Structure formats: structure tokens, C-alpha cells
Amino acid sequence: MPQASRVDWVDYAKGFCIIMVVMMHSTLGVERAAGNEGWMHAAVAFARPFRMPDFFLISGLFLARVIDRDWRSYLDKKVIHFAYFYVLWVTIQFAFKAPMSHEMDWRGVGLSYLEAFIEPFGTLWFIYLLPIFFVTVKATRGLPWLAIWLVGAALEITHVDTGWTVIDEFAHRFVYFYTGYVFAPHVFALAARVQIKPGPALAGLAVWAIINGALVLVGYADRPFVSLALGLVGAGAVVVVAALMARSDMFRPLRYCGQNSIVIYLAFFVPMAATRIALLKSGIITDLGTISLLVTASGVVGALAWYWAVRGTPLRILFERPAWARLKPAPIPAMQPAE
């Protein structure tokens, strides 16, 4: 059951974002393995300007509620929490992927594993980066917010490309996280207005979709300044879509995905990869777009099924942080969901 304190449209937005992330990995993985593109490629390309910006903006929305906590409590909730799941799941992912590295000896495999703590491994870079953002915002809280935002915007505009994911993604994404933190009251106000007057919101969405799609189509979406504008406006568009969805119970499964977005993020790679291999090898379905859609669905549902299967068992530590992985005594219950 959803917690009463949860904001419904935020869960819809997180659900929308996590499905787009799974869709991207699923579609590109299928196309890379098949050596060709399917019709799902257009949907992935359309979402690219705002897919991760919105995820980071949403992640910053509730930061004001905890940023005044003492550093020990703050680090426990915003750093150790994500570090626990990163270490656990990078080990799980590596266990699946390392045997495929036939050209490496055991020493090379071990060094590759250790490298994952410097260079984020596989799909897990998001939860690697979040604690860095949380610490950065708290450490710079005494500085003028506008100066921090302008620095973040400048980093995004410069399109930093060092080859190191931590530096590059920090430069590309911090401005969106900080925007969620600083402008949270305005974001919530936007969602409230949309729910009261959906008509103008729908018209605005139509205009945004045309502009976003056109810029993606002509190859301008990644240009300096354009990428920042599309990221911010696109994140706002997702907020609008989520607020509209929250007016009805029709999309409750999407909300459930949002409530468990980190669960899906952590575990989708196994069912996704298994389904991709099975469908491509079987040849039962030949349309790459349909295969990509089925692989996406399998990644989402498979991750949730994994979560449902381990609840109430010792393996729940895959998705719930145990008391021993804390900096301070945990309240009852001792387990904390991965969200």
C-alpha cells in the first residue's frame, strides 16, 4: 500500500522515468545485438534530451527536508544508503558479466572489479553519482544558490568529455539535480496548477512534443544551450504528464513502478538480458521494435518479480538495507527499502 505521505504525481514521474531508462537499455541492446534499428529507436531518441534530467530533478525535490540534518545522519541516508546498494549490485552484475570476459585472466577480472569503484559499472552510474550530488549540495549550502546554479548550467553547456563517467555525468547532470532542490516549491506549484486546469497543460505538452521531436530529428538536441533548455523544459513536461496521470487511477501500475523505481533500476538488467538473448536466438519474432518492447516489459516486470520473490526472506537484503549497513542505530523496522 502507498504511504500516505507520498506525493502521487512524483511516483508517476519516477515510474515514467524508470520505464524510459529500461526502454533505452533494452532497445539499444537489442539493436546492437541485431546490427539494425527498430521502430522503438525513435521513442528512445525522443526521450533522450529529458530522460535523465528529469530523473535527477525529481531526485532533488525533497532534499530540503533532510539537508539540515547533522552530517552523520545525512551521510547515512544519502551516501551510505546508496553506497550499500552500489557495492552489492555491482558485485552481482559483475558476477553475471565477468565470465563473458574470456580474454581476461583472473588478475584482470579482479582489477576490472576494483575499477568499478572508480569508474561506475554497467547501468549503476546513477546511484554512484547521487551521493556525490547530495554531498556537494550540502557542502556548498552556504554559497549563493544562483552562483551554484550558474556553475552547474555552465558545466552542462560545455559538454565536458573526459572519458571518466563520474566527471562527465556530474558536469552533464548536476544542474538538473540542483534545479530540483532549489526550485522544488515551483515544481510542486506547477503540478498543482496542472491538476486544477489540465486544458492549457495539454496544449503546452503538444507544443513541447513538436519542438523536442523536431530538434531531435534534425540533430540539434545535443547542441550547447539547446541541450540544457530541452533538459529543463522536458523535465517540466514529465512533471506535467505525471500530474495529469495522477488525476486518475487508470495508471496505478505506473505509480507502483515509481514507488519501486530503484528496485527496478537495480535488478532489470538480468531479465532484460535473458529475454533479449532468448528472443533474438529463437527467431520467433523478427520485428526488432516488438522485441525491444517485450524486452523492456520483461526488464520491468522481471525486476519487480525478483523483489516480490525475496520479500520476507533473508535475501530481502538485495533491496532493503539492513541495520548493520548503517552509521547509526536504525528505527524499527530495521530494514530500509531501496528508494
Image (cartoon, helix red, strand yellow):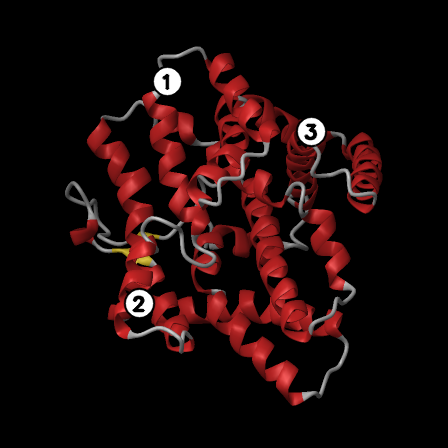
| Residue 285 located left or right of residue 11 | right
Q: Which residue is mark 2?
A: 108
Q: Is residue 252 visible?
A: no
Mark before the other along the chain sequence, 2 or 1:
2
257 shown above or below 26:
above
Residue 12: % across, % down: 59, 47
In the foreground, 59 or 97: 97
In the foreground, 334 or 86: 86
Q: Amino acid at mark 3?
A: Ala
Q: Secondary structure at mark 2?
A: helix
Q: Which residue is mark 3?
A: 229
- Residue drawn at x 74%, y 48% is 46
How crowded pointer 2 is (Cα within 10 Å; few <14, some 14-19, many 20+) is rated as: few
Q: CA distance from mark 2 to mark 1?
A: 42 Å
Q: CA distance from mark 1 to mark 3?
A: 25 Å
- Residue drawn at x 44%, y 38% is 167
4 shown above or below 303:
above
Q: Which residue is mark 1?
A: 141
Q: Amino acid at mark 1?
A: Arg
Q: Amino acid at mark 2?
A: Gly
Q: CA distance from mark 3 to mark 2?
A: 42 Å
Residue 44: % across, % down: 70, 55
Mark toward the viewer: 3 or 2? 2
Mark 1 in CB contact with mark 3 (< 8 angstroms): no
82 shown above or below 320:
above
Mark before the other along the chain sequence, 3 or 2:
2
Quadrant assignment, res 194: top right
- Residue drawn at x 47%, y 57% is 123
